[in-house]
Image: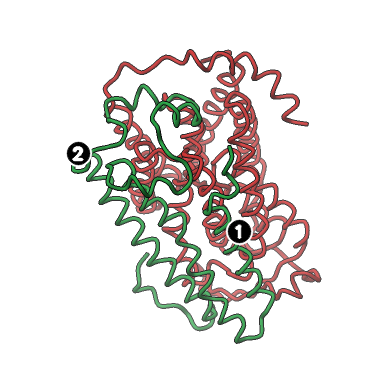
Amino acid sequence: MSDSESPSPLTQQPEALRYALLLNWGTRIGFTVLVCSFTAYLFGLLPPHVPLDQLPAVWHHPVAVHLQLTGTPTGWDWLTLTHKGDFVNMIGIALLAGCSIPPLLAVIPLFIKRRDFAYAFICALIAGVLVLAASGILTSGH
Amino acid sequence: MMLAIILPLALPAYAAESVVPVSILPWWFWPLALFITCFLIGIVAVPAGIGGGTLFVPIIGGFFPFHLDFVRGAGLMVALASALAAGPMLLRGGLSSLRLALPLALLASMSSVAGALLGLALPAAAIQIALGIVILGIVALMLASKKSEFPLVAQPDRLSSALRINGVFIDGASGQTIDWQVHRTPAGLLLFVLIGVMAGVFGIGAGWANVPTLNLLMGAPLKVSAGTSGLVLSLVDSSAAWVYLNRGAVLPMIAVPSVIGMMLGARIGARLLNVLKGSVIRKLVIALLVFAGLRALLKGAGIWL
């Protein structure tokens, strides 16, 4: 993830360089947030929703049973629990899972400028799939 | 058809799932063991030339007390984090192609969402059996597949010509400038649909399947295939990971030590690349996969709980 790697003008197009730059920063931010929040969770700086010593009694259950036993919310409802040590980690996890969306959207204008409409459309479609998956619409009702 | 065979085998073990013994060890033992295991997996995964996610799910799912739902959620996060860590550098260096990755990633991300939904709907024992079969299949693929550094692509197919899927990269080893193009794109797209489903169902990432498809089927140079595989993985695993996240199947106490352990181990593994004997590590990883694959198969069938 080093910025010092100078790209060869022979090998890469501007859209690839822009994609790499944004993905690099998204990944760095996600990792930093994840490590900080997990440290806070592990050392008890934030009280957890599920007490740490009770985890072994619930982590062997299927997810549906686990949710019932722990009162854990699904979808984006975890946002209401980010003051809890376990749920604050979901911010870093969501940042990592979502950090491909900004690069995909950012390269669309570059493809359009080069009249490469097929790739602009493909980028928009992948971003759409990611947003749809992230929205929780597909998993609601289960 | 595969599921029709697996489900009856899995039913006795599914009934036995509710009697899985609760660990008597203190809570911190398992995250610590997870961190150390992932650190070691990270070290051997790089010289063995496979993604850490491929080893993670069968080993952690087979020998740790976590439910397979959480192991698969963590497995996707591990595979995603590894792909994201290497992706930008490979893209800048010309070893990863956006033009090659994007069309494949589109279909594979859609199918990985479907795979994740399917995986979370099936009983864990059925997934364990199918996972065992897939892992043993990966071993067979690792033993049988031959890699081609620079495959010959005499004529690109119509689809790859229309999408201008080609490129130039400078091979660091020889200093040569290599022009590449691909063929059999429709077949490649079809295989990536299947790869996406498997990534979503099993949470194992899919580098083991991406590279042979890109290199042997589509004819991309080996280094471009390996680099582009990471970029495709970052999109495919993101899509599937969101499904697991929204369903509550990503448990931070399992996912985060795994991600950190794997990332640290992979950094050591990359540094040891020239010191460790690749062939010895590869044999060790194959032996581990055979053991973990058999364990998954027997655990799913209720024979070895």
Looking at the picture, tell me which residue is in the foreground, B173 or B220: B220
The residue shown at (36%, 40%) is B252
Please give the residue where the numbered disc 2 appears in the rendered image. Answer: A44
Identity of the amino acid at label 2?
Answer: Gly
B136 sits left or right of B62 in the view: right
**N-term mark: 1 or 2:** 2
Q: Badge 2, how many Cα within 10 Å: few under 14, some, many 20+?
A: some
Residue B37 in view? yes
Left or right of residue B158, residue B299 in this image: left
Q: Residue at x 59, y 44 (%)?
A: B200
Q: Quadrant of the C terminus of chain A?
A: top right
Q: How many marks?
A: 2
Q: Is residue A77 above or below residue B90?
A: above
Chain coloured red in this rendering: B
How far separated are the C-alphas under marks 1 and 2?
37 Å
User: Which chain hosts label 1?
Assistant: A
Identify the residue under disc 1.
A129
Please tell me whether mark 2 sits on a helix, a strand or a loop.
loop
Q: Position of residue B127 (x, y in %)?
A: 61, 30
Under mark 1, the amino acid is Val
Question: In which chain is the residue bearing label 2?
Answer: A
Residue A128, image quadrant: bottom right
Residue for point 55% across, 57% down: B235
